[in-house]
Structures are given as structure tokens and as C-alpha cells.
Image (cartoon, rainbow, N blue to C red):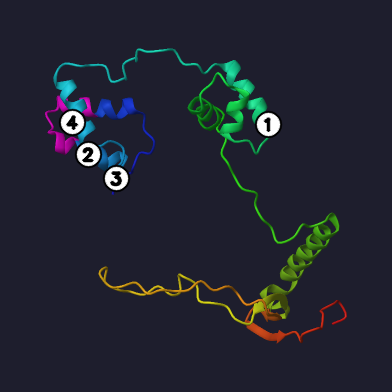
Amino acid sequence: MPHTIENPADSEVRTVIRFLCAQGFKSVDIHHQISEVYGENIMSDGMGRKWLRVFKDGRTNIHDEERSGRPSVITDELIQKVDCKVKENRRFTISSLAEMFPAVSRSVLYEIVSERLNYRKLCSRWVPKMLTDEHKTKRLGSALSFLERCSNEGDDFLSHIVTGDETWVAYVTPESKQQSMEWRHSSSLRKVKFKQTISAQKIMCTVFWDRKGVLLVDFLTRGDTINAAA
């Protein structure tokens, strides 16, 4: 199977079309060969026919012609000013940014932010809990201890490790929309499913397990609590 060339320049693909055109290949064959080497989405069949036609008409330039029109309003100075405003408030919106630059259109501001400055809107990565320096030190010590035991005892020591965790379990957990899906004909009537919420009543479930499987599942009696002594 031939190797696929990723992210080729437009001029490179047009050079290949011009070469195959000079070799006398038909449009269908040219599109097939280009798709085989560069991928199916590199150029549509219609665009390939267009370039084949202009090369047959005598065109030798493989680059895009310069477009006439108004000069770009995006300058290095404007990009720097927008970058400063972004760093002042990372939760900005294009609308709020447009209020700071009333002479610049929203589309231009979006282009500066996303294409010139390469900013992307990302959510914070959620973690179960925030670890203090003391927690991190203890975890590092445990990891080093495990590595030492693994070096001295081999994998057998893993059978002596028991892990525990707890979670709230609701008395009633309604069936999700995904779980209620059924295979039916497109003309069949769709079932009606009423929206339900998870039961407010819940119980604490504690689970302990080792490398072979679950050792203990325990449900906490209502009103009791778990502490270090328990």
C-alpha cells in the first residue's frame, strides 16, 4: 500500500497535475493517482478538472494569482494590541473584544485571535481533588516504596495491595436515554419516555479490591460516618 503524503502544499499538487497532463493522462486517472498518494480529500474532482483545463490551455504558473481589492487591515501593531487584551482577560468574547476595537470588524478580530495568534477556547481540566505538597510527597514516597518492592520481590507483591474507594448510590437510578434505545424501522412510532431524575435518597457504598477482583462491597448504615478509625 503506497505511503500517503500529508499536508502537501497546493503548488505541489498542481505540479503533479501539470506533469501528468503533459504525460497525456485523463482527468479521472489524474484524480485517482492524486487521491491515492495525498488522500481523498486533498482536491475535488471538479477542481482537478479545472487545473487540468488551464494547463492544457497553456498556463505554466502553479501558484495562485494575486487578488485585487482593498489591502488587509490586519497589521502587526493591531495583532499586538489584540494579544495584550487577550492576556488581560482570558475569558473574553469576540463581542467584548469588538467593543475595545470599534473600528475593526468582528470577522477580522476572530481571524486575528484564531489564525494569527493561534488561540483556542479550552475548558479547565477537572481533577478529583487538589493535592497539597504534603499529599504529593506522600504519594511520591509510596510510589518509590512500590518500585523498591517490585525490584526486590517481583510482581508477587502486587497481590498484597488492596485498594478501596467509596461512592454514593441512589436508591432509584432512572434508565438513561441511551439505554432506552431500540432497533426499529424508520416508519415505526417512537416510544414516549418521561423525564425522570435520580432519587434524592442515597446510600454510601464502599468497595475494596485487589488485582484479582472485588474483595468487599459494604453499604454504610444511615447516620453513620467513615473516619480513619473505622
Foreground disc of the pair 4, 3: 4
Identify the element where label 4 is drawn: helix
Q: Mark 4 and 3 residues: CB-CB less than 8 Å, in contact?
A: no
Q: Mark 2 and 4 residues: CB-CB less than 8 Å, in contact?
A: no
Q: Which residue is mark 2?
A: 33
Foreground disc of the pair 2, 1: 1
Q: Which mark is residue 49?
A: 4
Q: Which residues are magenta?
A: 17-30
In space, the residues marked 2 and 1 are separated at their CA atoms by 47 Å
Q: Quadrant of residue 226?
A: bottom right
Q: Which mark is residue 87?
A: 1
Q: As rendered, which of 192 and 229 lies closer to the eye?
A: 192
Q: As rendered, which of 95 and 62 lies closer to the eye?
A: 95
| Type of the residue with mark 3 | Pro
How busy is the neighbourhood of tag 4: few (under 14 within 10 Å), some, or many (20 plus)?
Answer: some
Q: Earlier in the sequence, mark 4 or mark 3?
A: 3
